[in-house]
């Protein structure tokens, strides 16, 4: 197996719902022998309920405030692969901290791929709309211009989880600021 790059700060997974941030991130963490953390899981733990319940009981603004607190804490915690919820990188303050203090990886996927992948798992309040495809299309238009500020972009449509991990490892190996 090719040499593993030595990671000194968090590797942050960016992308829309269904992009594979958690699945690919978990495998990447194993490959790099560093811990894996999921920001949505940390928010759930802190709130003691599901993301859907947080949206329903406290509203999206409260969820976004929770995201910010969790990210501020985790970005200080040293090397790890950190999967984020799709909205995290859209917050100006959090984004500039991610860009300053971590290596960010955008998992890019087409609308068709995202529609297919998000249909396999529920629990996403933003997609509880009459037309999830339309919602995802709108989010692509709003978010992809911002996601492209990430350090590294990986096209995932034609990749398996394993091959996406290897593309990320190769991209990391080419850098000296990780
Ligand atoms: C969101 C994405 C979700 C979750 C929340 C909001 C978003 O995470 O944080 O439902 O704004 O895109 P995943 O991207 O892991 O599905």
Image (cartoon, rainbow, N blue to C red):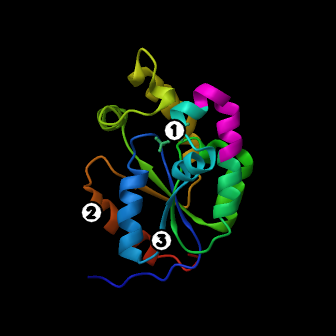
Residue at image location 42% in from the left, 14% down from the top: 130
Q: What numbered label is drawn on residue 162?
A: 2
Q: How many labels does the image show?
A: 3
Is residue 148 in sight in this rendering? no
Q: Which of marks 2 and 1 is nearer the N terminus?
A: 1
Q: Which of marks 2 and 3 is nearer the N terminus?
A: 3
Q: What span is colored magenta in the figure?
A: 55-66
Q: Earlier in the sequence, mark 1 or mark 3?
A: 3
- Between disc 1 and disc 3, the foreground one is 1
**Circle 3 residue:** 35
Residue 65 colored in magenta in the image: yes
Q: Distance between the residues labelled 2 and 1?
A: 29 Å
**Circle 1 residue:** 50
Percent from the top left, x then y, of residue 90? 63, 42
Q: Distance between the residues labelled 2 and 3?
A: 18 Å
Specify few, some or many for label 2: CA neighbours under 10 Å numbering under 14, 14-19, or 20 or more: few
Residue at image location 43% in from the left, 21% down from the top: 134
């Amino acid at each position: 197996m090719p040499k593993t790059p030595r990671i000194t700060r968090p590797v942050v997974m960016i992308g829309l719902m269904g992009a594979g941030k958690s699945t690919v991130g978990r495998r990447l963490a194993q490959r790099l022998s560093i811990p894996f953390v999921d920001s949505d899981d940390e928010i759930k733990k802190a709130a003691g309920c599901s993301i859907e319940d947080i949206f329903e009981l406290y509203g999206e603004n409260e969820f976004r405030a929770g995201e910010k607190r969790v990210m501020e804490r985790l970005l200080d915690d040293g090397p790890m692969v950190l999967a984020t919820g799709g909205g995290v990188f859209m917050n100006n303050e959090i984004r500039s901290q991610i860009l300053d203090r971590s290596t960010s990886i955008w998992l890019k996927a087409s609308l068709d791929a995202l529609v297919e992948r998000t249909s396999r798992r529920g629990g996403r309040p933003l997609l509880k709309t009459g037309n999830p495809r339309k919602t995802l299309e709108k989010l692509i238009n709003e978010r992809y211009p911002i996601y492209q500020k990430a350090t590294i972009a990986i096209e995932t449509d034609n990749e398996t989880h394993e091959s996406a991990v290897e593309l990320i490892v190769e991209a990391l190996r080419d850098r000296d600021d990780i």
